[in-house]
Image: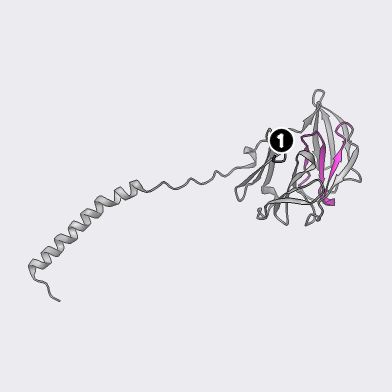
Amino acid sequence: MRFNRHEILLLLIGLLALLGLAKLLLPQLSWNAPPAAPAAPQLSPAQLPQTDLTLNGLRFEIDRQGKTVRAVDVNQNRVVWESRGEDRFIVPGAAFPLDLSPEGELWVANVGRKRLERLDPQTGRFLAFWEPAAKFAGCCNPVRFAALSGGRFVTMEKGSRRACIYLPSGELERVLSDSLSASEHDYHLYHTADTVHLYDLHSNQHWEVPYHDSP
């Protein structure tokens, strides 16, 4: 097909008109486009609150190197008692968590035995232990836990990479996640007034678990 001079001129004018229209429309389209959702902030361990484990003037701590739990008088800053649990704590790695329940029960994870042990807050004497009906997987769990009201527990478990809530009987109540990060060093847990907060810092996941059962 051949175009004469007049047709070529009209074609060029049409193309220029289209280019001008495009220049007018593109800024308008960009202006009306919805803004991109901001990325969730990446937290670090230093940004997470620390749980205060103090009861009746005693602050409860762990000695990872000595594999003991101890109570320190907050006024005199002296060790009141030191406990090795029922038959010593087995602590193969970094995890050696402990917690106070809303009822004031002191629990510590004997991770090598894959259970929780209850100690008398006033003396450190071993009182009882709790373990899930289906044993924790891996060599040493739970690497993080919190004692909820009524004898329930929330855990973060390495190996199986799960966050779970368990009933006092040891039966599993609910799985919060089965896709935690591979490293337990990304797992963090802390308390607020009536809620336990669980964080997986690597995947930036966050769960909130109330202390008390839902009505």
Quadrant of the image for the N terminus? bottom left
Residue found at x 85% / y 51%:
113
Q: Residue 164's x, y, as percent?
A: 72, 50
Residue ID for mark 1: 51
Check the image and report above or below for 8 versus 46: below
Front residue of 74/114: it is: 114
- Tell me where residue 136 sits by quadrant: bottom right
**Residue 67 is inside the magenta segment:** no
Q: Residue 150's x, y, as percent?
A: 79, 40
Q: Which residues are magenta?
A: 95-122
Residue situated furthest top in the rendering: 75
Residue found at x 76% / y 38%:
149
Q: Residue 16's x, y, as percent?
A: 18, 58
Q: Secondary structure at mark 1?
A: loop
Front residue of 39/72: it is: 39
Q: Residue 134's x, y, as percent?
A: 80, 56
Residue found at x 83% / y 51%:
112
- Tell me where residue 196 sits by quadrant: top right
Front residue of 117/202: it is: 117
Q: Is residue 66 visible?
A: no
